[in-house]
Image (cartoon, grey):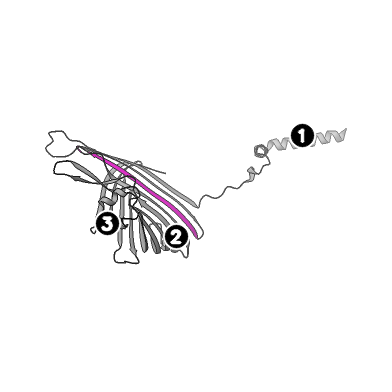
Amino acid sequence: MRLCIYLLFLLLIGVGSVYGQTDTLPALRKLFNQGNTVDSVIVRPDSTYWRHKLEAGFNLNQGSFSGNWKGGGVNSIALGLLLNARLSYRRNRFNWSASTQLQYGIVKNAQQTLRKNTDRLYADTKAGYRLSTRWQWFGSLNLLTQFAPGYDYVTLPSGQELANPISNLFAPAYLTESLGLSYEPNDVFDLRLGVFTVRQTFVTDPDVRLYVPRNYGVPLDQTVRTELAFQAIFNYDQDIAQNVNLKFRYLFFADYRDFKASDHRLDFTLTGKINKFLNATLSGVVLYDQDQDFKIQYSQALSAGLLFTW
């Protein structure tokens, strides 16, 4: 009898001590609720090697004047859309990145048909293997073209306006594969030296060939031209002041068969953030390509609108 009372006393003490440990019971309940399964012990992969950035923008410009406005002017409205995306992976000596830039804008002036004022479709991917803290081998692939037809507007003596097609989707398009060395001293700029670069120039719209005599360097009886060349690309991206960002990209391309007839292209964008969503942007392109024209070409745009970043 005494033994039974003694055992009962020890049992009560043990139960009381368990209930007194309020930290233990919730942990035990959680463990039993999870169950003894494989899912409960899976270790999730580390995602810190990945980085991403996404920008979506909307720009709207409008101007109107009364019929008796003596200062002069034309009623107009312009709409622009943009999407910039970047995804990168970096681990040990290996790194990979992919980016895309999509831009399209239209403008409607009084007494004129709807026309585009911005059109760009660009995609780039690059893989690298680091040799030192600043130098690495790289291989890249990129595509540059546009979304919609482009026209040369000609007004006849009768006043009639003609729209002659001079460009279109994949007319032209530039597909470039490159192997070489890359210099990346910091996150602000990098330099690619593509010693083995192959570029295909496509002109797939037969109507474009009728109004572009040089046909962007592609023989008139063909739709693609292939070049083996040296290519250098310089990228710069930095906040030069508070809420002010400057990006520019310079490209040098020279066919090994005719090194003097080199191509030069400079793209730049200056963006100022007004607040979390509103921004003003100045962008432009300067281009010299003898396959298109023997003179320097340039385009410029100034806009304000909404910009969302993730």
Q: Quadrant of the C terminus?
A: top left
Judging by the rendered image, the residue that carries numbered circle 2 is 139
Magenta region includes residue 194 = no
C-alpha span from label 1 to label 2: 73 Å
Side of 18 where 208 appears, left or right: left
Rendered image: mark on residue 246: none
C-alpha span from label 1 to label 3: 98 Å
Judging by the rendered image, the residue that carries numbered circle 1 is 12
How many C-alpha atoms fall within 10 Å of the one at disc 3: few (<14), some, or many (≥20)? some
How many C-alpha atoms fall within 10 Å of the one at disc 2: few (<14), some, or many (≥20)? many
How many C-alpha atoms fall within 10 Å of the one at disc 1: few (<14), some, or many (≥20)? few
Q: Are marks 3 and 2 in contact (CB under 8 Å)?
A: no
Side of 177 where 273 appears, left or right: left
Position in image of residue 165 (x %, y %) = 27, 47
The residues colored magenta run 92-114
C-alpha span from label 3 to label 2: 31 Å
Q: Are marks 1 and 2 in contact (CB under 8 Å)?
A: no
Position in image of residue 268 (x %, y %) = 31, 53
Rendered image: mark on residue 214: 3
Hey, what amino acid is under mark 1? Leu
